[in-house]
Image (cartoon, grey):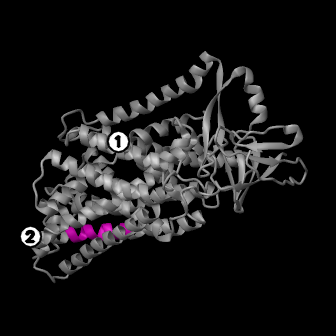
């Protein structure tokens, strides 16, 4: 077996302590020992970066608050009213927050198994789908890259932030004033994330701590209300016969579940930055569940507090003002005026957490080679942050804010973005079983952390429920178009990307007589490692396959035992000596070529 040992070099050419050993594998593609941890991944996947060009700014608190800050946005302050309206039951509304925690815990276990298999890969779903479905080559990366790039806007979060800022100021803003402030606020937060990951993480951590304090204050106040320590009369009125009037409308049930899932979305945000965490999997395994436990307890108790202080009929009609009604009931109108400012702070932290996580997914799509000019998307110049992904996310957010009027069209895009996400999570669950089968077939060790079958089955069933039930007619359709439009469009986009893939990867190469191969590039500026999809004429494919491995590493002079990793003008190449021996002894020289 040909094995080669490779020592990595920084952009300045300094010898770096971390090392990697790779070997060819018929089914998995390549085997990597990362700081003593054995990793097997498909060769077409984005190459492992031994030293993160983005640095290591994510610690224990960073993981905790990346998840907390994305989970606690504005949902817990605004969605209880819409959930009660959909379910028509106080008891079931509170139970739904418990169900949401259980569902999120099951899905979190799925992410943990993937992270144990690929501990040095950021991007979350981008990476995990790439590795779960390596065949047909490039299909899932192509499909996911489209949704990651096309739906990378955060316009709804920015608009919510602007509205609460105006509400805190006591100003009744027009739609265009809301749009202007939304763009200005988002630009400011994106600029912070662009200039420094370290300081944007620190600010996000601070804001997240404030969020937890706000929720904790609501919970403690709720206990005071239930104990009769406030001016609220009969605080337990909503809990009498609390399960009466449960709706039997399937569309309402799924709407409530979607709202709950949205409130908990963010439990896996830290998996987008795995490569920026030292000793990532053991740290994630400890901290990620803690973040979900903290948030779920506060969510449930905060809803109990709302129902203790505010009549159910008022909550049902409150829309996004549930928390405001709570403060008005307990402390009076003057106290409630300060709430929008607190919610605006919470929304700002949510936006920063989303920017940090989502831009890593976009960068990973670039490293896969699915986006033109991969070196641009993978680059961390000039500030040590993902410059191009942040710029793209900012531009698309501003375009959506400017182009779409508030209302049905705006909400349609939000629903459309969430529908394929359920499909991808379902595919991740199925992919776990597929990876286990492939590894067993190849005689490879299974993941150090394996998700329980019950968690996998629960996650799959919830995804199927969310995907199927929106087709059930609602009792009232308050939109200006058919209620299932976003489902049809979401499925249509996926099928469209499958068609595009076969045209781009299968039909066009056949017509023009070439084959698509991956080529590994290493930037000589920041050490970023990426793939580029290369068109190799069919007459040269045999020679290409003889001189390259599955991951696109150049193997030059195989007979002399010399290999060169990477390629491309202006990119760092590394020459590695290879020896074929029974004990796989290997040695290396490191030099720029």
Q: Position of residue 578 (x, y in %)?
A: 84, 47
Query: Would residue 170 be counted in the magenta stretch?
Result: no
Q: How crowded is the residue under tag 2: few (<14 C-alpha within 10 Å), some, or many (20+)?
A: few
Residue 258 in sight here: yes
Q: Residue at x 67, y 55 (%)?
A: 446
Q: Position of residue 526 (x, y in %)?
A: 59, 52
Residue 247 lies left or right of residue 562; in this view the side is left
Magenta residues span 295-306
Q: How crowded is the residue under tag 1: few (<14 C-alpha within 10 Å), some, or many (20+)?
A: some
Q: Name the residue carrying label 2.
A: 333
Q: Position of residue 49 (x, y in %)?
A: 62, 53
Question: Principal SS element in the magenta part?
Answer: helix
Instruction: Say which of marks 2 and 1 sits in front.
Output: 1
Q: Residue at x 55, y 34 (%)?
A: 139
Residue 240's place in the image compared with 401, above or below, is: below
- Asked if marks 2 and 1 touch (Cβ < 8 Å), the reply is no
Q: Position of residue 143 (x, y in %)?
A: 49, 36
- 564 and 111: which is toward the camera: 564
Can you tell which quarter of the image residue 39 is in?
A: bottom right
Where does the C terminus fall, quadrant-wise?
A: top right
State the residue lying farthest toward the right. Answer: 582
- 136 and 563: which is toward the camera: 563
- Helix, strand or loop at disc 1? helix
Q: Which numbered dot is residue 396? A: 1
Q: Earlier in the sequence, mark 2 or mark 1?
A: 2
Can you tell which quarter of the image residue 133 is in?
A: top right
- Helix, strand or loop at disc 2? helix
Residue 187 lies left or right of residue 380; in this view the side is left
Residue 260 in sight here: no
Label 2 – label 1 distance at C-alpha: 38 Å
Q: How many marks?
A: 2
Query: Would residue 304 be counted in the magenta stretch?
Result: yes
């Amino acid at each position: 077996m040909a094995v080669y040992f490779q020592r990595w070099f920084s952009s300045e050419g300094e010898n770096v302590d971390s090392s990697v050993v790779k070997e060819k594998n018929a089914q998995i593609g390549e085997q990597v020992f990362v700081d003593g941890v054995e990793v097997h991944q498909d060769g077409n996947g984005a190459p492992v970066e031994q030293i993160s060009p983005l640095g290591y700014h994510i610690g224990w608190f960073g993981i905790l608050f990346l998840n907390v800050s994305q989970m606690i946005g504005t949902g817990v302050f605004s969605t209880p009213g819409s959930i009660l309206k959909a379910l028509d039951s106080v008891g079931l509304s509170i139970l739904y927050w418990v169900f949401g925690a259980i569902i999120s815990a099951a899905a979190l276990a799925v992410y943990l198994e993937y992270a144990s298999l690929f501990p040095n890969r950021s991007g979350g779903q981008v990476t995990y789908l790439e590795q779960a479905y390596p065949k047909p080559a490039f299909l899932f990366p192509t499909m996911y890259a489209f949704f990651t790039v096309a739906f990378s806007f955060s316009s709804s979060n920015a608009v919510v932030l602007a509205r609460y800022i105006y509400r805190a100021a006591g100003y009744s803003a027009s739609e265009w004033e809301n749009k202007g402030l939304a763009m200005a606020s988002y630009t400011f937060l994106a600029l912070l994330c662009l200039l420094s990951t370290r300081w944007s993480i620190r600010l996000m951590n601070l804001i997240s701590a404030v969020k937890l304090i706000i929720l904790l204050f609501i919970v403690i106040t709720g206990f005071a209300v239930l104990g009769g320590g406030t001016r609220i009369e009969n605080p337990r009125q909503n809990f009498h016969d609390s399960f009466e009037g449960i709706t039997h409308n399937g569309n309402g049930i799924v709407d409530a579940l979607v709202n709950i899932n949205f409130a908990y979305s963010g439990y896996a945000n830290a998996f987008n930055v795995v490569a920026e965490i030292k000793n990532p999997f053991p740290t994630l395994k400890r901290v990620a569940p803690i973040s979900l436990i903290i948030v779920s307890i506060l969510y449930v108790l905060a809803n109990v507090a709302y129902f203790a202080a505010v009549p159910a009929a008022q909550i049902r009609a409150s829309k996004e003002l549930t928390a405001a009604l709570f403060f008005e009931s307990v402390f009076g109108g003057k106290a409630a005026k300060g709430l929008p400012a607190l919610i605006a702070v919470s929304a700002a932290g949510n936006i920063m957490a989303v920017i940090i996580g989502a831009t890593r997914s976009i960068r990973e799509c670039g490293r896969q080679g699915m986006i033109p000019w991969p070196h641009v998307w993978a680059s961390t110049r000039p500030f040590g942050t993902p410059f191009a992904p942040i710029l793209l996310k900012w531009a698309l957010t501003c375009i959506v804010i400017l182009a779409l009027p508030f209302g049905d069209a705006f909400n349609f895009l939000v629903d459309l973005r969430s529908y394929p996400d359920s499909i991808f999570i379902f595919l991740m669950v199925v992919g776990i079983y597929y990876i286990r089968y492939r590894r067993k077939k190849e005689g490879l060790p299974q993941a150090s952390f394996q998700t329980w079958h019950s968690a996998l089955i629960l996650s799959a069933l919830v995804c199927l429920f969310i995907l199927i039930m929106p087709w059930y007619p609602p009792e009232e359709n308050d939109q200006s178009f058919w209620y299932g439009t976003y489902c049809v469009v979401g499925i249509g986009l996926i099928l469209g990307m499958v068609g595009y893939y076969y045209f781009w990867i299968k039909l066009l190469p056949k017509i023009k007589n070439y084959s698509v191969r991956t080529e590994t590039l290493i930037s000589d500026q920041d050490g970023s490692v990426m793939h580029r999809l290369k068109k190799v004429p069919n007459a040269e494919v045999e020679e290409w396959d003889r001189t390259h491995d599955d991951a696109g590493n150049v193997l030059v002079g195989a007979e002399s035992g010399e290999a060169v990793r990477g390629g491309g003008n202006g990119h760092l190449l590394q020459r590695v000596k290879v020896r074929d021996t029974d004990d796989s002894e290997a040695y290396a020289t490191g030099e720029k070529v």
